[in-house]
Image (cartoon, rainbow, N blue to C red):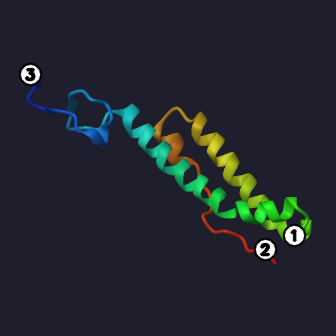
Amino acid sequence: MIYADNQKPCYDWTELREAYTDVEPVEHAKERCRSAAISVLKSLLDQTDYEAIKYAEGVTTAAQFANLKVAREAWRTAINTIQAATTVEEVTAVTYSTTIPTVD
C-alpha cells in the first residue's frame, strides 16, 4: 500500500487498520476518550458492588448506604451521558467524582 507523505501505516493501538495522518482521527479520539471515561466509571461501580449487595441483603441500612447510592446513580448517569455524546468535547465535558463515599 502506498501512503501519502503525511500518512503512516496504522499500528494495532489505533484499531483502525488503515493509513492515518499525523492527526488522530476525530472518531478515534472520541471513542478513545469515551472508553477511558467509561472504564473509570465502571471501575468505581465495580469497587462499590459489595456495599450495594450488602444493602440489598439488608446488612446495611438505607441511611448508611445513602451517600454511596447517590454516587452510584451519578456514575451511571455519567456513563449514559458519555455514551450519548457525539463529540470529544461533549465526552470531556462530563464531570464526575472519583471519590468513593464511605458506608458507616
Badge 1 amino acid: Thr
Which image quarter: residue 29? top left
Disc 1 secondary structure class:
loop
Q: Which residue is nearer to you in this view: 92 or 18?
A: 18
Q: Name which of mark 1 and mark 3 comes first in the sequence.
A: 3
State the residue position of label 2.
103
Badge 3 amino acid: Ile
The relative height of residue 30 versus residue 73 in the rendered view (above or below) is above
**Outermost residue toward the front?**
57
Q: How many marks?
A: 3
State the residue position of label 3.
2
Q: Quadrant of the N terminus?
A: top left
**Outermost residue toward the top?**
1
Could you tell me residue 49's position as x and y percent?
71, 60
Q: Which residue is nearer to you in this view: 98 or 61?
A: 61
Q: CA distance from mark 1 to mark 3?
A: 63 Å
State the residue position of label 1.
60
Residue visible at 25% across and 38% down in the picture: 23
User: Do the residues under discs 1 and 2 have CB atoms within 8 angstroms?
Assistant: yes
Q: CA distance from mark 3 to mark 2?
A: 59 Å
Q: Which mark is residue 83?
A: none
Residue visible at 22% across and 31% down in the picture: 20
Residue visible at 62% across and 57% down in the picture: 96
Label 1: few (<14), some or many (≥20) within 10 Å? some
Label 2: few (<14), some or many (≥20) within 10 Å? some
The relative height of residue 38 versus residue 54 in the rendered view (above or below) is above
Q: Name which of mark 1 and mark 2 comes first in the sequence.
A: 1
Could you tell me residue 46's position as x and y percent?
64, 58
Badge 2 amino acid: Val
Residue visible at 65% across and 40% down in the picture: 80
Left or right of 11 in this view: 5: left
